[in-house]
Image (cartoon, rainbow, N blue to C red):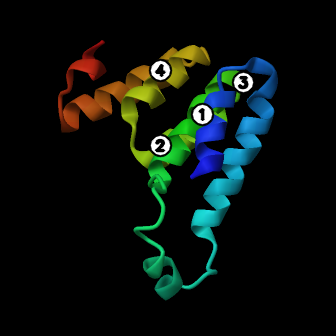
Amino acid sequence: CALFMRSKLEAAALRKSERTMAQLEALIDCYRAATPDALERQRLFYCMSVPPHWVVEKELACVMVKLGCVSGAVQVYERLEMWEEVVRCYAAAGRKGKAEQVARERLAQRETPPMWC
């Protein structure tokens, strides 16, 4: 999708970050839209290389962190179950106790090297 690629390119420029965030939010809204129906989407599935919705949402969360909207990024990362990023966001926001709590909960379920760091 051209809009996604444009958003990724513009995310590097700080003054274009707000526009990037708006573009990514518009893309996510398109994923959630009920129109066109599933049959129409299926017919066009192989015509475009559209990224999965979780890739677009992850990019949105990265832009949010860059703009300082850490609490919004935490919500996106929690929905995507990207726990390492959740811990990083809490630590960046100064909520080290919450970051430690999330890390310990995740380590109790499954140990991963990034979670130990």
Q: Which mark is residue 8?
A: 1
Crowd around label 4: few <14 · some 14–19 · many ≥20 (10 Å): some
Q: Position of residue 61 (x, y in %)?
A: 58, 36
Query: Which circle's residue, 4 or 3, is located before the other in the chain?
Result: 3
Residue at the spot of label 4: 88
The residue type indicated by label 2 comes to Glu
| Mark 3: secondary structure | helix
Q: Position of residue 47 (x, y in %)?
A: 46, 67
Could you give the CA–CA distance between mark 4 and mark 1, rounded to whole angstroms? 21 Å
Name the front one of labels 2 and 1: 1
Crowd around label 2: few <14 · some 14–19 · many ≥20 (10 Å): some
Does residue 13 appear in this view? Answer: yes
Do callouts 2 and 3 mark residues in contact (Cβ within 8 Å)?
no
Could you give the CA–CA distance between mark 2 and mark 4, rounded to whole angstroms? 12 Å
The residue type indicated by label 3 comes to Leu
The residue type indicated by label 1 comes to Lys
Residue at the spot of label 3: 67
The residue positioned 65% from the left and 21% from the top of the image is: 12
| Mark 2: secondary structure | helix
Residue at the spot of label 2: 78
Residue 102 in the image: above or below residue 21: above
Outermost residue to the front: 47
